[in-house]
């Protein structure tokens, strides 16, 4: 061991260090580095003092099963984070994820999960962000920046088109080049360009017939050559297959096969050596995939770390405060007739808090799959509200006798790993998709019975996916969507219900009136896929989510971007600093926003752009930017959002790149994809 070796010097240029280390490693050592040692770590190389690199699951926090069975902050589900539309909060959550990953003795967190929410029924929607690549990439890149500010590697997953769970290990995504680029690649591309994630996880599924980890088109042509990703690529756990073997994965650009036991069966020393002997690969191919992994080792400071140590429990109030703040800002007020909310504590003597999700604790081993984070404690809705009202109101069981009833319903993570596996319990969970858009029948019955006993029944939804509300919407005065609000959820919920926090969450997904209205559900071929052929057809093309509803003028139940407040906001005076833009460059849209209500609150200003005339079919409008603004009653602010010429682009299959055409574009500003009171035109010149 040369103590003065360049690769050990953290002050030297990263690439010099990587190249130095590559030169020192012999071929056997290189081979042991590209496959894990066990479920969560890589093989150390004692001769060169390369420690093991450790990973833990995310993205809702540091997962229990991969952190020495540790307990950590359980955040709201990331679909809720996206519903905050708050980039600063995403960064703060990322920072905590980074800090707790480090405390858990790991170097990388396997998140954020960034697959586009293509269908309301995907089992993992709760772990993802949005149906829209701009919202998704803006939130995800802040998460990544926050995580990596702590010298912990993020791992964006599951690249790419793993947008449902049914047969995820076998199914092949069939998609047009334009849709692939304009929705799915764009999401990853923008995250990578904005935040340079050090790691990425490649999917289980096939992409146009070839499994992710051996798919040269997605891993090399798109990820490296088009996007310029320089981080390392990990296989999803057991995703590398023997179909084309070790050589195919190495040539495609897979840096690390995980895990190193049981499911990891492709980059074994024997198989890699065989591929070398047969001349299918050469040492330079191994260098090519190993370099990004070594780069991550350097970036997380693997060589500078002290003795490995870890905390079993992180119970840090500042971290939990951030989890609570996210929960508070994530909640989406979907209905509020006659301003029944916020509740007036002084006027309430008896409250009924009922429903299957009122006392349910989330965060049990493997509940929902690999995202299961077990927190040191969990404040259920029941406990949070009970504590909040304890001095002035009584909690009772029968809605009949209550001044107000809080009915807490929704989905769950399928009831725990084994129950899900054995009984195929339906819910928000890895490994399976929902088959129904509605609530379980029992819950619909419960709503109707409860409302019959007490018309002042507020519905609180705890779920990680859109839910059909059409059957019972008219019968209830108010609906609050709380997503999965995490370990502090009960406190957050109480503060929102009683008006200490004014709800400001906005839907990151469209809620269709019925599932058949949704572009991913026009046929079984599209979702869950043709299970005989083992193909899933993304035939809606670029018209994902609201893009489709707008194009076909279909009224959604709740539109993308929608969410009520206890206040009202008035938008006026839209301006663009430029009326013409030529070539590359920025332009700034400003809008005045006034809180015309009586309560302080926040509004999300959303900017959508549509091409007035184009040589190809385009969505009528697409989200391009947004900003959340906080206003006291009567206060007015000017919100400025700077965009660039990429706001006009689409993917040209002819030219094989993103292009913009000269002409006039309409820019809308508003508070949801269907509430856009202001507009202005801009001329773009190539
Ligand atoms: C999941 C990943 C997860 C990995 C390790 C896989 O089944 O798809 O999201 O990170 O397991 O637990």
Image (cartoon, helix red, strand yellow):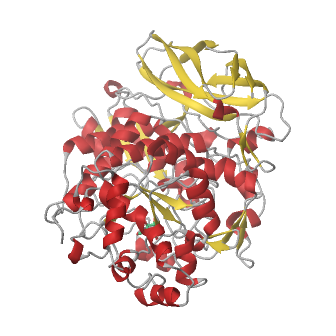
- Between residues 47 and 620, which one lies in front from this camera angle? 47
- Between residues 185 and 291, which one lies in front from this camera angle? 291
Residue 329 appears left or right of 180:
left
Give the x, y percent position of residue 530.
74, 72
Give the x, y percent position of residue 479.
52, 39
The C terminus lies in quadrant: top right
Q: Residue at 24% across / 53% down in the picture?
A: 10
The N terminus lies in quadrant: bottom left
Q: Residue at 49% across / 57% down in the picture?
A: 411
- Between residues 108 and 225, which one lies in front from this camera angle? 225
Give the x, y percent position of residue 532.
74, 79
Q: How many marks?
A: 0
Residue 556 appears left or right of 277:
right
Q: Residue at 49% across / 66% down in the picture?
A: 430
Residue 132 appears left or right of 658:
left
- Asked if one can make out residue 221 in the rendered structure from this viewpoint, the answer is yes
Q: Which residue lies furthest to the right in this view?
A: 615
- Between residues 613 and 322, which one lies in front from this camera angle? 613
> Considering only vertical position in the picture, is 32 above or below 373?
below
Give the x, y percent position of residue 466.
58, 50
Task: Answer with the quadrant where ligand 1 appears in the image.
Answer: bottom left
Q: Residue at 48% across / 80% down in the picture?
A: 422
Residue 664 appears left or right of 45:
right
- Asked if one can make out residue 376 in the rendered structure from this viewpoint, the answer is no
């Amino acid at each position: 061991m040369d103590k003065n070796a360049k690769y050990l010097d953290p002050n030297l240029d990263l690439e010099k260090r990587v190249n130095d280390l590559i030169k020192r490693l012999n071929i056997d050592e290189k081979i042991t580095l590209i496959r894990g040692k066990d479920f969560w770590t890589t093989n150390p190389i004692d001769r060169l003092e390369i420690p093991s690199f450790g990973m833990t699951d995310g993205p809702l926090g540091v997962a229990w099963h991969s952190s020495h069975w540790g307990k950590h902050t359980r955040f709201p589900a990331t679909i809720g984070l996206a519903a905050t539309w708050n980039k600063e909060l995403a960064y703060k959550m990322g920072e905590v994820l980074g800090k707790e990953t480090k405390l858990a003795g790991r170097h990388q967190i396997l998140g954020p999960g960034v697959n586009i929410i293509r269908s309301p029924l995907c089992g993992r929607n709760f772990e993802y962000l949005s149906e829209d690549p701009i919202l998704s990439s803006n939130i995800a890149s802040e998460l990544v920046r926050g995580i990596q500010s702590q010298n912990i590697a993020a791992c964006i997953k599951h690249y790419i088109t793993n947008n449902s769970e049914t047969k995820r290990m076998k199914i092949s995504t069939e998609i047009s080049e334009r849709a692939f680029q304009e929705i799915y690649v764009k999401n990853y591309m923008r995250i990578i360009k904005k935040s340079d994630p050090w790691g990425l996880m490649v999917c289980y599924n096939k992409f146009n017939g070839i499994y992710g980890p051996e798919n040269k088109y997605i891993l090399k042509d798109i990820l490296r050559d088009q996007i310029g990703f320089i981080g390392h690529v990990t296989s999803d756990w057991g995703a590398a297959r023997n179909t084309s073997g070790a050589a195919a994965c190495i040539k495609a650009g897979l840096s690390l096969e995980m895990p190193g036991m049981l499911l990891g069966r492709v980059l074994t020393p024997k198989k890699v050596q065989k591929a070398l002997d047969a001349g299918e690969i050469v040492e330079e191919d191994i260098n090519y995939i190993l370099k990004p992994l070594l780069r991550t080792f350097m970036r997380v400071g693997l060589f500078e770390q002290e003795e490995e140590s870890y905390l079993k429990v992180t119970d840090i109030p500042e971290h939990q405060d951030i989890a609570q703040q996210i929960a508070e800002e994530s909640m989406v007020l979907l209905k509020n007739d006659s301003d029944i909310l916020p509740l007036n504590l002084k006027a309430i003597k008896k409250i009924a808090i009922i429903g299957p999700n009122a006392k349910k604790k989330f965060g049990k081993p493997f509940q929902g799959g690999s995202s299961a984070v077990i927190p040191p404690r969990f404040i259920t809705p029941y406990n949070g509200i009970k504590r909040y009202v304890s001095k002035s109101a009584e909690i009772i069981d029968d809605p009949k006798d209550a001044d107000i009833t809080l009915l807490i319903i929704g989905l769950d993570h399928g009831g725990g790993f084994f129950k899900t596996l054995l009984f195929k319990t339906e819910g928000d969970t890895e490994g399976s998709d929902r088959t129904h858009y509605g609530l379980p029948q029992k819950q619909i019955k419960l709503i109707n019975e409860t409302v019959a006993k007490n018309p002042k029944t507020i519905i609180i939804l705890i779920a990680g996916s859109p839910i059909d509300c059409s059957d019972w919407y008219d019968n209830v005065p108010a609906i609050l969507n709380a997503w999965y609000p995490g370990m502090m959820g009960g406190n957050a919920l109480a503060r929102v219900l009683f008006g200490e926090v004014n709800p400001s969450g906005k839907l990151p997904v469209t809620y269709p009136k019925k599932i058949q209205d949704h572009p991913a559900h026009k046929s079984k071929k599209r979702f869950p896929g043709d299970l005989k052929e083992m193909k899933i057809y993304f035939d809606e093309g670029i018209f994902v989510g609201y893009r489709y509803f707008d194009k076909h003028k279909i009224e959604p139940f709740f539109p993308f971007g929608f969410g009520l407040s206890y206040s009202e906001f008035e938008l006026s005076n839209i301006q663009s600093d430029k009326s013409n833009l030529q070539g590359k460059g920025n332009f700034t849209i400003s809008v005045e926003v006034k809180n015309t209500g009586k309560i302080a609150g926040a509004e999300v200003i959303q900017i959508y752009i549509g091409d007035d005339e184009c040589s190809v079919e385009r969505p009528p409008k697409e989200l391009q930017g947004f900003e959340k603004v906080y206003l006291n009653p009567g206060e007015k602010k000017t919100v400025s959002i700077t965009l660039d010429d990429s706001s006009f682009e689409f993917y040209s299959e002819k030219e094989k790149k993103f292009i913009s055409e000269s002409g006039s574009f309409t820019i809308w500003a508003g508070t949801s994809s269907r509430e856009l009171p202001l507009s202005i035109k801009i001329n773009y010149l190539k």
